[in-house]
Image: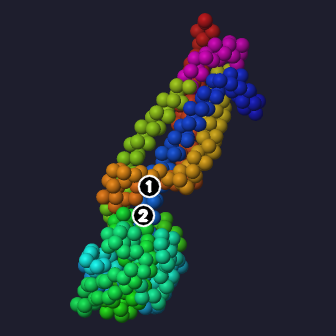
């Protein structure tokens, strides 16, 4: 215990040296936490914007639907099927959708669009669709109206209370045509969704496509998203071979591949960052070793065992590195929180470049506590590992040589 007290006193005998050492660790922790929370936040935002609306985390279709996504491969919705899906309590909410494509017209302007019929209440529970509403009113279950994505409305030059016409092919070759008032405008995080999405109540969509009682998919919101594959496997075993159960990673492999490749690239960047951190910490430790060379030689010369001197230096290193890491983690919390609530936003040509790839040009940080702990522990381990060098030098140090001026 006396060695710990002595180690703490030694740190503050030279305040400038200790502050410089702690500062190098302090800023290293902040930098590593900020870099990794930014990466994780970008990926979480991408998944949230694209996956949480369009695909959901897990989808249930009729077998073969995903290979040929046409209305003829839809299936009859039933309470029994929903009960089987929710049987093991791993699924929190299930909502049906009827998805198809159609031509949408307003006056002399015609565009292609994705028509999605939804259960307005359940859909809002899963995707928080009402929060994407920027103008007008959210749809009710019995409404005979539509909501348009902001970009699609701009292309059609329509707004609230204007009327649009839908023309397409319905179930089993029936003609699909109808006129609908625009009840609301939505803004999606994904530019791709923002320029082609039309939302309407499920019953109105079934009536439009003559697909009464039919749905193309069930969208599932699990109680936890940590292990989607095992959850999907349980649902699949309950439903049998008549249905196919797919996670968002299977539905959108390009997004999964993008995240995977960027994660691998980030590992290289993190490696370079940790290398710079090591140089910074080692430089301050080397400076400390040179400044205290005479002191350590004197302690050994007056009878202090080298084992106790090594232990004393170890305690000093632990106190210095752990204090710097703790302060860095605490200081990183408000920084990360600020950029989570006020994410980096790009405009101009950069925003257009991101939009072409279907990504929102918004970079928030992640406030996941595991990121703070992992980065803090990593820098702590690096600091303690580098601290072995002064301990080694103290053990092999010759007192006579060390005290020679």
Residue 213 in picture, x, y percent from top left: 38, 92
Which stretch is magenta?
285-304
The residue at the point 48 percent across, 29 percent down is 279
Q: Residue at x 43, y 77 (%)?
A: 160
Taking the magenta stretch, the answer to whether it contains residue 297 is yes
Query: Going 51% across and 30% down the picture, which residue do you hit?
Result: 280
The earlier-in-sequence mark between 2 and 1 is: 2
Q: Which residue does the numbered mark 2 point to in the structure image?
A: 189
- On the image, numbered disc 1 is attached to which residue? 362
Q: Position of residue 150 (x, y in %)?
A: 40, 69
Q: What secondary structure is the stretch in magenta mostly built from?
A: helix
Measured from the top left, where is residue 255 in percent x and y? Answer: 35, 61
* Quadrant in the picture for residue 67: bottom left
Task: Look at the numbered discs 2 and 1 and tell me whether their residues touch, using CB distance below 8 Å.
Answer: yes
Vertical side of 398 occupied by 47: above or below: below
In front of the other: 333 or 192: 192
Please report the residue visible at 32 percent of the width from the left and 69 percent of the height from the top. 155
């Amino acid at each position: 215990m006396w060695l710990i007290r002595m180690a703490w006193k030694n740190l503050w005998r030279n305040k400038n040296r200790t502050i410089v050492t702690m500062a190098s660790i302090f800023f290293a922790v902040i930098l590593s936490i900020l870099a990794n929370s930014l990466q994780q936040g970008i990926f979480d935002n991408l998944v949230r914007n694209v996956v949480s609306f369009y695909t959901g985390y897990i989808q249930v279709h009729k077998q073969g639907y995903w290979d040929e996504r046409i209305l003829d491969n839809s299936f009859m919705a039933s309470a029994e099927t929903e009960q089987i899906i929710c049987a093991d309590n791993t699924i929190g909410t299930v909502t049906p959708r009827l998805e198809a494509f159609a031509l949408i017209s307003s006056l002399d302007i015609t565009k292609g669009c994705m028509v999605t019929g939804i259960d307005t209440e359940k859909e809002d529970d899963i995707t928080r669709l009402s929060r994407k509403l920027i103008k007008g009113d959210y749809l009710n279950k019995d409404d005979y109206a539509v909501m348009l994505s902001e970009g699609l409305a701009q292309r059609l030059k329509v707004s609230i209370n204007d009327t649009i016409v839908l023309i397409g092919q319905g179930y089993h070759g029936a003609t699909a045509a109808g006129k609908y008032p625009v009840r609301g405008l939505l803004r999606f995080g994904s530019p791709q969704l923002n320029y082609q999405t039309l939302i309407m109540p499920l019953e109105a969509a079934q009536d439009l496509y003559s697909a009464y009682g039919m749905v193309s998919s069930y969208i599932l919101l699990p109680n936890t998203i940590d292990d989607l594959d095992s959850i999907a496997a349980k649902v699949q075993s309950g439903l049998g071979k008549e249905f196919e159960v797919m996670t968002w990673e299977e539905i959108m492999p390009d997004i999964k591949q993008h995240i995977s490749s960027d994660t691998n690239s980030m590992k290289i960047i993190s490696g370079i960052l940790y290398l710079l951190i090591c140089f910074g910490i080692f430089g301050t430790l080397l400076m400390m070793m040179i400044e205290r060379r005479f002191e350590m030689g004197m302690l050994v010369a007056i009878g202090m065992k080298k084992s106790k001197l090594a232990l004393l230096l170890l305690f000093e290193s632990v106190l210095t590195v752990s204090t710097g890491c703790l302060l860095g983690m605490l200081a990183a919390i408000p920084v990360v929180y600020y950029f989570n609530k006020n994410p980096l936003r790009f405009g101009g040509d950069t925003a257009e470049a991101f939009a072409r790839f279907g990504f929102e040009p918004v970079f928030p940080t992640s406030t996941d506590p595991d990121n703070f702990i992992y980065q803090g522990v990593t820098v702590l381990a690096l600091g303690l590992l580098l601290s072995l060098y002064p301990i080694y030098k103290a053990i092999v140090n010759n007192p006579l040589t060390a005290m020679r001026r």
